[in-house]
Image: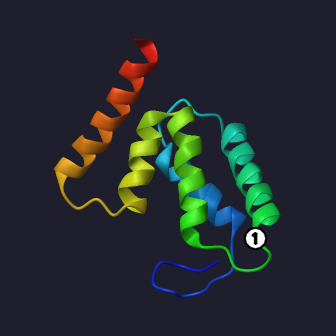
Amino acid sequence: MVKRDDRREPFSAEKLLQSLRIASRKRSVSPGKLEEIVEQIVQEIGDKYDREVPSMAIGERVMAALKDLDQVAYVRYASVYRRFEEPKEFIQEVKKLEEKNDSVTS
């Protein structure tokens, strides 16, 4: 896996699963669903990439899966993945989710 700073490290499905567990801690998300997400991502990156996988490709897939699964877990993960540093960044992300929800229910 190629990190943002161009470091390379082996991909770890267990590390990915752990980050999903942290994001969804104290949420009503089943452990089995988190494992399914990891399996799906592993399959997708295996199909698309031969050797090196940009960490961004993994992170974006995780965020898409969490956005559909649990929006609180999504914001938690996004805050680390996108490196939120200010409260306004959280607020902006939540507003995007609210706008999406409003357009779906309208």
Residue depicted at 41% across the width and 52% down the height = 78
Q: Going by the image, does 105 lie left or right of 96? A: right
Residue depicted at x 40% and y 11%: 106
Position of residue 104 relative to residue 6, above or below, is: above
Q: Is residue 9 left or right of residue 25?
A: right
Residue drawn at point x = 50 percent, y = 34 percent? 70
Q: Secondary structure at mark 1?
A: loop
In the image shown, does 12 or 66 lie closer to the viewer?
66
Q: Position of residue 82 (x, y in %)?
A: 37, 61
Q: Is residue 15 above or below residue 24?
A: below
Relative to residue 87, is residue 72 depicted above or below? above
List x then y, in percent, for residue 96.
Answer: 33, 37
**Depth check, front residue: 53 or 16:** 53
Please name the residue that numbered disc 1 is placed on.
49
| x 28%, y 35%: residue | 95
Front residue (pair 42, 96):
96
Q: Quadrant of residue 57?
A: bottom right
> Is disc 1 surrounded by few (<14), some (14 to 19) or many (20+) residues within 10 Å?
few
